Structure formats: C-alpha cells, structure tokens
Image: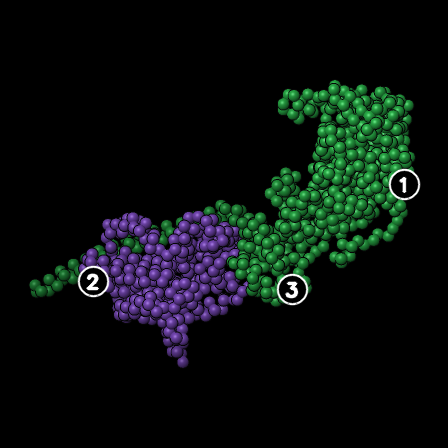
Amino acid sequence: MRQFIAQRLLSRRLTNIQTAEIDRFRFRVKCATAFVLLGFVLLLSRLVYLQIARNDYYSTRAEDNRISLIPILPSRGTILDRNGEVLARNYSAFTLEITPALVENLEETIAELEKLVEIQPKDKRRFQRLVNEGRPFDSQPIRIRLTDEEIALFTVNRYRFHGVEVKARLFRHYPFGATASHVLGYLNRVNKADLEMIDEKEQSANYKGTSHIGKTGIEKAYEFHLHGETGYEEVEIDANGHPVRRLSSTPPVAGSDLTLTLDIRLQEVAEKAFGKRRGALVAIDPSTGEVLAFVSMPTFDLNLFDDGISQENWDRLNNSPDRPMINRVLNATYPPGSTFKPFMALAGLESGKRTPEYSFHDTGSFTIAGHTFRDQKKDGHGHVDLYKSIVQSCDTYYYVLANEMGIDSIVRFMGRIGFGQRTGIDVEGESEGILPSPEWKRRRFRRYELQRWFAGDTVSIGIGQGYNAYTPIQIAQAVAVLANDGALYRPRLVKDISDNRAGVKKSVEPELVRTMGWRQKNVDTVKRAMAGVNREGTAARAFLNAEYTSGGKTGTAQTFSLRGGDYRASRLREELRDHALYIAFAPEDKPRIALAVLVENSGFGGQSAAPLARKVLDHFFSARSDAPPVVSGTRAARGEL
Amino acid sequence: MSSVLPRLKRLVFEHLDLPLLLIIAPLMAIGLLTVYSATYDVSNRAFGQLVNMSVGIVVMWGVARVHPQHLMRFALPLYLVGVFLLTLVFFAGVRVNGAQRWLSLGFMRCQPSELLKIATPMALAWYFQKYETAIKIRHYALAFLMVLVPFALIAKQPDLGTSILVGAAGVYVIFFAGLPWKFIVGTLVVAVAASPFVWPLLHEFQRKRVLILLDPTIDPFGAGYHIIQSTIAIGSGGGFGKGWLQGTQTHLEFIPERHTDFIFAVFSEEYGFLGAGVLILLYLLLIARCLMITINASTLFARLLGGAITLSFFTCAFVNIGMVSGVLPVVGVPLPFMSYGGTALVTLFCSLGIMMSIQTHRMLLKK
C-alpha cells in the first residue's frame, strides 16, 4: 500500500514536472513565434523600402545598367582649297585596341599579340603613352592600319584575348602632306584643357567618344564646324557589357566641309620657292581680304599626327633650330624695314607735309639731337622726290619726313592701316606686334631713363627700323589696303562652309573693316612709285620681263645693330644676318593680289625676297585658267584612301 | 480489388500532412517558375529542379512513415557518422572553388555538412529526451559542445552558411529544452563582447563580406557588386514586378548566382513586392503549421526536433532574403523551395518528412 502511494505520488510529481516543462515549452514556442514574426517584419520593411519607397531610384539604376549609349562619331568635315582640291580628309582604318582595365597582364597580352600581328617598338611606346594619359576603360590602339590578313589572324584567336578588339577608326589625312601645314593645323588627343574648353562651349555631350581635336590652324579655329554632331546608338547590354540588341539610334551628322580661300597650287609654288630658307609669305586678294597663300617656312608633315605623333617626331619638330612649329605668319614679328616707306610716303602726302613734287637734297645723312642717321648710300641720293625716294629706297627722305610728322601722327596713320594690331584673321593665336609710341615705351620699360621717347626713335621708325615689329599678316594686310585704295577687308582663310545637316553652302562674306578715306591721287602717287620699284628700282632685276604690271617695295630688317661697323653678311653668323623683305601688288591697276614676303637672315630684300615674290606672281598670273589638278606626289604614294 | 484502392490510398497518404502539403505545393510551383526564368536563356534547370523535388517528395514520404521513436534511435549514430565524415573532409576533402566541402566517394561526391543540418538537432533532442525532467546545467554544456564540433568543422571548410544553419538548429534545440534565460542573455552578451576576437579568426573573404555589407560601394566590381546588383533587381521590381521572364537584371545577367543563392532577387524583380509578400506569407504559414505540429507533439524528442526544424526553415529564409536584399552579409544559404540544388532540397524535404511523421504518429502513440 505504501509502495502504491509512493508510486502514485512519484508519478504525479513526474506529471507535474512534465506539465511544467510543457508549459515552459509552450512559452518558448510563443517566444520563437515572436522571433519569427519580428524577422519577417524586418524583411518586409526592407522590401517596402527597396521596392516601394525607392523603386524609382532602383528602376533608374536598372535602366542605366541595361541601356548603354554608344556614341557614333561623325566624320569630320573635309577641307578644300578655293579650287576644290582636297586638303584634309578622313579615311577609316582598322586598329587593334586594348582596354587596359580588362586585361590582367598588359605586357603578356602584348607579347602574345606580337605573335599574330607586327607590333613595332614605336607602337608600344605610343600605346604606353596613351595608356598613361587615358583612363583605364578607354580602349587604346596598339596597332594601326591592320592588314586584312592580320585582322583575320586576330579574329581567329580572339577568344584568347579578353579586352582586345579590332575597331574601325577614322583617321585624318592631308593629301598635300607638309604643304600649308600652319594654315590647316593638326589634330591630337583631347587633353584636359580641351575638355574644359568643350565644357565651356557646352559641347560635352557632343564630344563623348571624340578622341581627337584640332590643335592649331583651321582644324582648331573651325573645330566646332568640322566636328559634326555625334550620333548615338541606344543598345541593351548585358552584365559583361556586350550589346544584346539595338533599341534605337540617332545617326551622326558629318561635320561641315570648309572651302578655304587658299590656292594650294600657289601655296606650293611659294613654299617651293623658299627652298630651305626660313620665312613667311602672305598673299591676299585685296578686294575681299581672302588669303591666297599663307606660307610659314619651314613646314612640317601634318600626316605625322594622324595616329598620334611619336615622341621622336614631336621632339624633332620642337627642338629644330629652324622652329618649324612656329606659325611665322601670325606669331613672328619683324621690323618692316624699307617696306614701311610707301606707307610713310602716303602718310606724308595725306598729312600735307609732302607733295609728290617736293624734293630735297640728300647728302647721305640726317642729324638730330647730336645723333646722325646714315643713308645706305654713303654719299646720298642727291635730289630726291617722293617717287625717287621709294624707287631707290632713300632713307634720309624718311628720316626727315618722320621727324617732321612726329610720332603721334605716324602712329595714328599706321594704326588705322592695322600695324601693331591683330588683324582678326579667322585662325587663332595671332600676335599683336609693336607699333611703338611714347605711351608704348612708358609701358614697356620700367626704368625711367628708358621710358623717355627720343626724337631719334621717331626717325628710326621712318625707315621701318627701331622698336617696331609686325607680323607678316599685318604687313600683307597693309599692302592690301594700299592696293585696294584704302578699303580694309579683314583677312580670312575660309571662303565657304557647307553645312551637311542643313545641306546648304554658306559663303563667308568679305568683311569691310574700315575705309581709310585717302585721297585717290595720293594713293596713285605711292602706287606709281611702287610700280617704279619693280620697273627701274630695287626690284627691277627680279621683275625683268614680267608679263604683268606690278608694284613693290624691297626692305631689309636689321636683326642686329652694328654700331658704326660695316655690314658684311658673310662675316656674321646666319641667325644674326638681316631679314629680307618684299611687298608687292599686281597688276598695277586694280590689283588682284597683294603680298608680303619675308626671308629670314638672307640679306637685302631685292636679292632674295623679290625673286621669290616674282615666282608666286608668275604662277598667279599664268595659271589663272589652268590646269587639270595634278595628283600630288604624297597623294599618289599613299594611294586613294 | 475493391480493397486495393483504399489500401493504396492509405499507403500513400497515411502519414502525409494535408495542410503542409497545401502550403508547400504553391511554394514548389513558384520555385519551379523562378528557376525556369533564371536559367531558361542559358541552360534550363527547371526540369532538373522538378526531378530534385520529386526525389525530395519521395524522401519526405519515406521519412514521414518512420515513427519518431525509431528516428530517435538513429539520432546518435547519424550524428557520429556525420562528425566522422566532417573530420574526413577536414583531412581528405576535395577542394572546389577554394572551399573544402566535399568528400569523394569515387563515383560521386557528397557533402557531409548537409547531413548535420538534421543530425545535429536530432542528436541533441535525443540527448535531452534521455534526461527528460532531470536536465541539469552540465547537460546544456555538453549539448553546446555537441553543436560546436560540427559548427567549427563546417565553418573551417569554409562554409559559413551551412555552419550557421547547423549551429542555429542545435541552439534552437537547447533553447526549446529550456536553457534558463539568464544563460541565454549571458550568451548573447558574451557573443557581442567576443565578436572583436572572432573577427581575426574569420577568413579574409568573410571579413570582406561583412565590410561590404556596411558599404557595398567599397568594392563595386568585386564582392560588393553582387549586393548592389541584387538590390537593384529587387528595388526595380517595384510593387508588382516586371513580369515573369521580364526581369532585365536577371536576363542581362547582372544578378550573380541567380538560380541558386540569389534567386530571391530574380523572383522579386519579376513579381515585385506583391510576389515577395506572398512568398513570405507562405513561409509564415509553413512555419505556423510546423509550430502547431510541434506544440502538439507527444514526446520531448519530437517537440525539440520539431521546434528546431521549424526555426531552421525560418533561419534559411531569413538569412537568404536578408543577404540578397542587402541587410545581412553574403553567406551561402539557399532559399527553401526556390534555390536550385538537389542536396539542399532533399534535406529540406527530409525535414518536412520528420514534421509529418511527428504529426501523424501522435495519435498512434496516444492509442
């Protein structure tokens, strides 16, 4: 019995314990339920946040993921000369390109590629430079102008090369090579400064995908005309960036074609006439301001730039003592020397200080304030009137005239012609030059004793020496104004722009800057005297038997002051020798061409500059109606690309 | 003849739980559709997944017929075999993708860690059942040790996802067995305090995953990429989704592992918040039904095992969705019924079979 009771008690106790355990278990299940509910609420709130609250944001992200805008580059406008000769065009070629970010080991990849296509050290160097300059996701060419066999060979092996692709790129080609290189200018990679400029002009969207931009000359000045409008292809891409399908596309619009005022044949003749000499020549149609020839010597081959100029070539161009990269027409300034005299003569006539008949006796020197200015002709020219002063280039006549006129009236007259001012020609980077005046001297010098303007300063300017320094384009412009009887048209290089989108060809109208208001008989007097120069004066030998009439003036610009000594060119180092100048217009009545020639360090204008001008003018007048355009050597050599 | 059909019917349905079947049927359907969408444009895995599910159902049916008392007999041997195999893996496992998880049997490879997902809670439940009504602190301590061994071995492979699931299942048993609250709170405090010391023990890539969770943009093209792309997929799904087979993130291959661990991103991109809500509701129903089964279970072993399995379903779903939606670190935990993969599915259906066994053998025991 006791045992039974004990057993019952034990079993009850056990049941009680079990019941307590079950109660505890049930409570724990409730806790677990709360835990589960809390977890799911947490997840749901996260989903509400992602899918409801921020749905717009993530939808955009998904779209951005999905859609890629691939720019389609427009083809750059071509550049033609005034007769339709192609000066700059595009050709497309296949390049082998590597995207550095997608390649694990660049060197290994290149080594492997070398087994398939020829890769030269210069290719590697260029590639390395481009990689250093660019972003890791830009694809950069390792080889340019692949042959068909090379393309085929690579394509077969393509699976081995992640991040390497064959692409078609447009390259710029200049059929005339080095001719007119300073006018046309070159393209090079878009750099940081370019990007800023593009951004400023709000062209950033249009330049997505553009790798090259005009750096100098027309290519730079008319960059936004030539570039065209970038098209876009909207493609769906997968996570690997491979296009899956095309959604839409906006075709690009090719850049505008430019017709230059330049006559490339005339340009060629002029450049050839320079030979190895340095210098500049500008020929302008005086009645419109159209620049017919724009020569800066030496030139450089623009095609060196078509696939990114190599470092060696770049160094060679920049370190050459001949400084071929300098645009002498716009950026070199020279004293005009005696070519200044016709303008002084006209100033004298216009101011009333001189008449054509006025004559004085030249003894070979002029002394003012204790300083004697000598004529080139030691014993003087004897009786000299205006005509003779120009034909024989009498210095003393102009010493006296300048002194009588005074610097202020000279500056006023010359400034109106454009000396010492930018012409506003339609390429960038023109220098201002120096038309010296007392005010200029005060600004130019810091020390008081140098700031003073001496009567002698004025006298030097009378013959185009001293402080004055003008760009060849300014001198040519002045000749054109004179030839055009005082109507100054802004010099310009672009004749028409054919807009490919609108399909219209727009001519650039001549821009009359101002009319000088000169008395015609004064202008005629000066022009007659200049005609005399070519007929019987300092340029007579150069223009012997010319088949057209012309007027000119020779000049010599001192680069080096010989205090009292004799000038003997042969004794001086070449770069210290005088510059030879020559200005001309032709024909004498109704001139159609006005030009200025400068040959650096080659002595008297009559000897070296005038014969050069003769060749240009001969071509200009002989070849007016010519000539089936001849395929030039460079073009033939490159084949029809 | 007339007696064959009812007998067959009985043979098939005797130990299956209808409410559970009604819940897992739509889950399986959704899973198949999503696997199809995630894979059809590469190589369709939906049929393979259907085969996996069929195998799973047969396993479930078989397990459901086994009485929990019999299951209990297998508990310790299964656990010991599992731990033994894990040790083998540790010394002689096959390395795949940098993780040593597989044991080569010559003709096939098996993943012992999967076995431990069920064996660990079973062994613990058996252990507590053995000491029913007289559980002492030292029993809890030993139980912890029993969890720690497989947990550590799996974590070392490294397979953080599975080790978390195994560890959690074991801890759930201990929790349901009645570990005093002071120890629970104490453990949590210790865990938080110890985390700085655990940090250096983690693998480099595991540490990185945690850091990336805090800021996915630190590695947008590496590991952070997965989280960024999957959150974009989920977020862009919006309220109602882009529609079946219409997910751009999915079909343009922005989502990594899209038919396995990241399948939730595929699903919620195509079905939106509505779909995700329905899925979570189904999980909730599954868990609710399992908890009901658990609470009515007749033995301690059944209660503890049932509770642990139920919470494991939750852990799986929570950790997976949490990681895909960018609130938890990326660990390899499959989403139940959704992620492609035979082993995990078989384990899942095996767990369901246990739940059904617990439910359907309750009456028999009372008789």
Q: Residue at x 74, y 57 (%)?
A: A638
**Disc 3 sits on a residue from what chain?**
A
Question: Which chain gets the purple colouring?
Answer: B
* In the image, residue B223 above or below residue A280: below
Q: What x and y, as percent, mark residue A518?
A: 85, 26
Amino acid type of the residue that numbered disc 3 sits on in the rendered structure: Glu
* In the image, residue B165 above or below residue A400: below
Name of the residue lying farthest toward the top: A369
Find residue B131 and name its label. Answer: 2
Would you name the residue on which mark 1 appears? A544
Q: What x and y, as percent, mark residue A406?
A: 77, 20
What colouring style does the render use?
A: by chain
Question: Which chain gets the green colouring?
Answer: A
Residue A334 in view here: yes
Amino acid type of the residue that numbered disc 1 sits on in the rendered structure: Leu
Residue A82 in view here: no
* In the image, residue A331 above or below residue B212: above
Q: Nearer the viewer, mark 3 or mark 2?
A: 3
* In the image, residue A154 above or below residue A130: below
Residues beneath discs 1 and 2 located on the same chain:
no
Q: Residue at x 90, y 36 (%)?
A: A535
Q: Earlier in the sequence, mark 3 or mark 1?
A: 3
**Mark 2 Cα within 10 Å, few/some/many (few <14, many 20+)?**
few
**Disc 1 sits on a residue from what chain?**
A
